[in-house]
Amino acid sequence: MIRFILRRVLGFIPVFLIIATLVFFLIRLAPGGPFMEGERHVPPEVLEQIRESYNLNAPLPQQYAMYMWDLVRGDLGPSMQQPSRTVSQWIVLRAPVSVELGFYSLIVALIIGLSAGIIASLRPNTLTDYIPMSIAMAGICMPTFVMGPLLVLIFALKFQWLPVSGWDAPAEKILPSITLGTVYAAYIARLARGGMFEVLAQDFIRTARAKGLSETRVVLRHALRGGLQPVISFLGPAAAGLLTGSFVVEKIFIIPGLGKQFVDAAFNRDYTMLMGAVLFYAVLILIFNLIVDVAQAWLDPRVRYD
């Protein structure tokens, strides 16, 4: 298992460098820049000095080499549009909010998705199966930018049960978490239903039932470990989707997270902030994928030798 984990960790290094390289050049291929004449009432000579201080006048290969050298040393540089803090300081300030939102959303997705999928698999081709899977399909078809305003309209504006925006009080975290988690709950429900349905048809499940074990013991003790394999495989991409999906949700509910910071940096063409946010999300996603790989290898030892 240690060799398995080391191989995965070493494989992440070139992936991270490739991501950093692609993002660096793609950002600079976009039209415009962080400091452009005509956008701000600043004399041209002052703009030239600002560009010089951020090494934007250097040739692109030289800018890339300097940035990668700073990155290797752990220096993400200052924010170009909000220089009161460095990029690292902004990430430390904003990232915990986004991670907290993603964690709550994942809990919502797992609770709703696993419950619906397991219940549907126990009684296939009945109303107990059709109703949860129909709701899951509706959840898949409804994106977060539709679900969020809809929940706000119903629960915040019409019934006034929950606040519209913010992230301080516990009640303010309910609607954003449900908005972000519902879509992935639908995927988890369908995956759990398919995985459990396949496992429940195996011979060892029939043997367990023949021995007189209760249905609860059969499901929890014998079927879950194999039936949830598709769900565990999906958790890596789901975690990535929850993090990147928080961009829209944070903007809708005015949550002071890194996603909102990323969107603002994109509008302002803040190169260093964009790079730092993308690389932070890349590291988180690689860590989530590593956790999923280890969990799969623990549940199914054959994965370690593939």
Image (cartoon, rainbow, N blue to C red):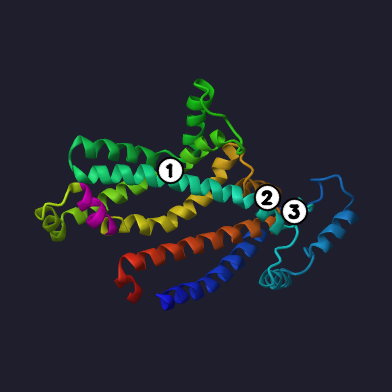
Q: Is residue 104 above or below residue 276?
A: above
Name the N-terminal-most of marks 2 and 1: 1
Give the percent coordinates (x, y) of residue 201. Answer: 15, 54
Can residue 50 be seen in the rendering of this structure? yes
Q: How many marks?
A: 3
Give the foreground label among 2 and 3: 2
Give the magenta range: 216-225
- The numbered disc on residue 262 is none
Name the N-terminal-most of marks 2 and 3: 3
**Which residue appears at 55% of the width and 48% of the height?**
100
Quadrant in which the N terminus appears: bottom left
Give the percent coordinates (x, y) of residue 181. Answer: 45, 43
Amino acid type of the residue that numbered disc 3 sits on in the rendered structure: Pro
Q: Main secondary structure of the magenta part?
A: helix
For label 3, count other residues whose C-alpha is less than 10 Å away and answer few (under 14), some (14-19) or many (20+). some
For label 1, count other residues whose C-alpha is less than 10 Å away and answer few (under 14), some (14-19) or many (20+). many
For label 2, count other residues whose C-alpha is less than 10 Å away and answer few (under 14), some (14-19) or many (20+). many
Give the percent coordinates (x, y) of residue 230. Answer: 32, 57
Residue labelled with disc 3: 34
Residue labelled with disc 1: 108
Q: Is residue 224 above or below residue 130?
A: below
Residue labelled with disc 2: 265
Instruction: Find out whether residue 91 is within the magenta segment.
Output: no
Name the side, left or right, on which 141 lies relative to 122: right
Q: Is residue 303 above or below residue 217?
A: below
